[in-house]
Image: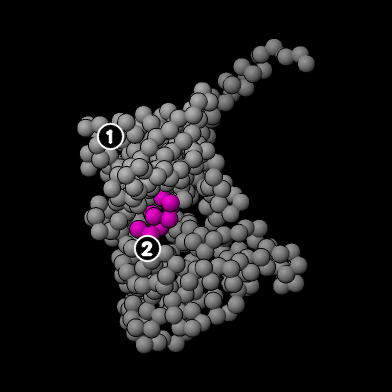
Amino acid sequence: MAAVIPVKRARGGYAWRVMARDEHKKMKQETFSGPDAVAVEKAARTFARLVDRVGITEASRIRTQRSGAATRGAPTVGEWTDAYLDKSTGILAGITDATRADYRRDANRYIVPRLGELPVDHVDVDEVARWVVWLEAQQWKGKPLAAKTVRSKHTLLSQILGAAAVKGHRTGNPARGAKLTRQRKRKMVVLTASELAVLLHFLPEQWRPLVLWLAGTGMRWGEATALTWGDLDRDARPMLVHIDKAWQRTQAGQKRTLGPPKTDAGERTISVPDSLVSQLGKPGRGDALIFPSRTGKALLSASFNPHVWSPALTRANGTEACEAAGLTPIGKRPRVHDLRHFHASALIGAGRPLPYIQARLGHEKITTTVDTYGHLLPDAQQGDADAVAVILGASLPELVELVAALPEIEG
């Protein structure tokens, strides 16, 4: 552990000395001085953290390298991350304030603690690889980070280093193409119609229309809960829903505001059956929310999930509760978002073409629809089975004869 010690100067004022033992157990030191006392102390403490990270020999080499004409001014990863995420610099544009706040939180939690003291031009492929190993060992609420979470943090680091290369602070992006450990993805949970009926039975009556709407339209939570009565064209046949807004956070942890849907393709118009619209009850004024909270404001998933959804799931999976109602436990714990998968699987089962499903769900690319739901296509599954049957049907008799002719294996 490096020691940071103030040293009184003969001409007045203080310098700062960083002391630590090198790999040979010999004590070494670096001294920081200058006219700005605050900046000098900050530089000394930043250097001390670098010493703790890489050792005083390597830290001293980096300091010397950075003072050279060729690399003078190259910021540390921490300094460059601050600049990259600072809205006023304009380096990272086109994102909401809430997303920027999320990036800053993730950087402070997963990037700066490990790489912050390193000069941005010092980070190489090996350093990124060591960071990935560390990242994959981290936990959140007692559980290992999900594969998707690891990928998102790696993507953020790659964006930060890539921007540094564009600005001339380094050459190339060592995070691009870094290998991440392949992890098992969370399986999609698709309810059957009968399982959805069991779940609806255990939901409070006032929330059943919302769950039915999510399952019957495939809308995202933020889109459905932003829906107003004016978005419904009840005179059209079939009735139409115009989706052009969704709830978004203005800042991390702050109240929601209305913004555009997740993607450009998210602005769409979909048809809905009269039977689904009838579940909504008496229409309200055009600008009134169809699915408000109990207080009439935006309905938050952070409140709905623990107080409504999770208790209903527990009962829908409970043997006693289901037996008392004459129902069969569903044996699944879907997320609210899985109602979107229920909708997509129902459309696929009905033979609707994938481009229609893509447009209805608001996917920007057909590849998203194919990658997400392609395995549910009944025609593809049947086609594969038919092809295997043809292959085996032609060669099966010969295979049986060959196996019969093989000598028996003892033991």
Q: Which mark is residue 98?
A: 2
Q: Is residue 233 left or right of residue 203?
A: left
Mark 1 element type: helix
Amino acid at circle 2? Ala
Task: Tell me if residue 129 is in the magenta stretch.
Answer: no
Q: Residue furthest top?
A: 407
Residue nearest the viewer, comparing 68 with 118 = 68
In the rendering, at what x and y percent does residue 342 appear? 50, 60
Residue 177 is situated, as x and y percent measured from the top left of the image, at 37, 35
Is 107 part of what is drawn in magenta? yes
State which region is magenta.
98-108
Q: Which mark is residue 321?
A: none
Q: Residue at x 35, y 32 (%)?
A: 62
As drawn, is 107 to the left or to the right of 324? Answer: left
Residue at the spot of label 1: 67
The part of the image, by quadrant, that contains residue 117 is top left
Q: Is residue 403 above or below residue 66?
A: above
- The overriding secondary structure of the stretch rendered in magenta is helix
Q: Mark 1 packing: few (<14 Cα in 10 Å), some, or many (20+)?
A: few
Say what secondary structure mark 2 lies in. Answer: helix
